[in-house]
Image (cartoon, grey):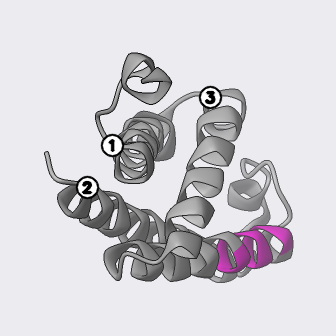
Amino acid sequence: MKKTTAAKLGGFSLLALGLFEVGGGLLALVISEAPPEIRATIPWHPVFALWLGLVFGFARILAGYGSIQMKKWGVVAGVLLSMETVVVVPSTFTSGLVGGLALPVALLTLFSLLYAMLGSDTLRDLAD
């Protein structure tokens, strides 16, 4: 795989996760107007979920754009955001769409962007 292909794959994955996260944050606005019995099933306050979704979602969208454009800052930001997702999702979302989908996509993104940064060189290649 070429480094450019890996960066674009990671970038589009970041865009998808970012849009998904912004959508989830905006969904929190709808949930805030839901009946109390439905709101009681949500582990976070809707305003907190809104801001969290918007901040991380737009950060992922920006990193995705940077990765697609082959910008170093975009790839590094994408790696950091993907590592955050790999750590947070299994401990926070143990079931459902987010738990089942976000972790595999974050791992795909992480490995694609690491490949874009480091390539297929081995450590032996670096020692020579």
Looking at the rendered image, the quarter that the N terminus falls into is top left
Q: Is residue 63 left or right of residue 31?
A: left
CB-based contact (under 8 Å), mark 2 and mark 1: yes
Residue at image point 70% right, 39% down: 88
SS at circle 1 = loop
Secondary element at tag 2: helix
Mark 2–mark 3 Cα distance, whole angstroms, equals: 29 Å
Characterize the local packing of mark 1: few (<14), some (14-19) or many (20 or more) Cα atoms within 10 angstroms.
Answer: some
How far apart marks 3 and 1 lie (CA) works out to 28 Å
Looking at the rendered structure, the number of numbered marks drawn on it comes to 3
Disc number placed over residue 3 in the picture, else none:
2
- Name the spot of residue 24 as percent of width and height, x first: 55, 69
Magenta segment boundaries in residue numbering: 48-55
The image position of residue 62, as x and y in percent, is 53, 82
Residue occupying image coordinates x 38% and y 36%: 104
- Residue 90 location (% of width, % of height): 62, 28
Magenta segment includes 52: yes
Return the residue at label 1: 119
Q: Which residue is mark 3?
A: 90
Taking 63 as reference, is 1 above or below it? above
Residue farthest along the front direction in this orientation: 128
Q: Amino acid at mark 2?
A: Lys
Say which element carries label 3.
Answer: helix
Q: Residue furthest left?
A: 1
Q: Residue at x 36, y 67 (%)?
A: 11
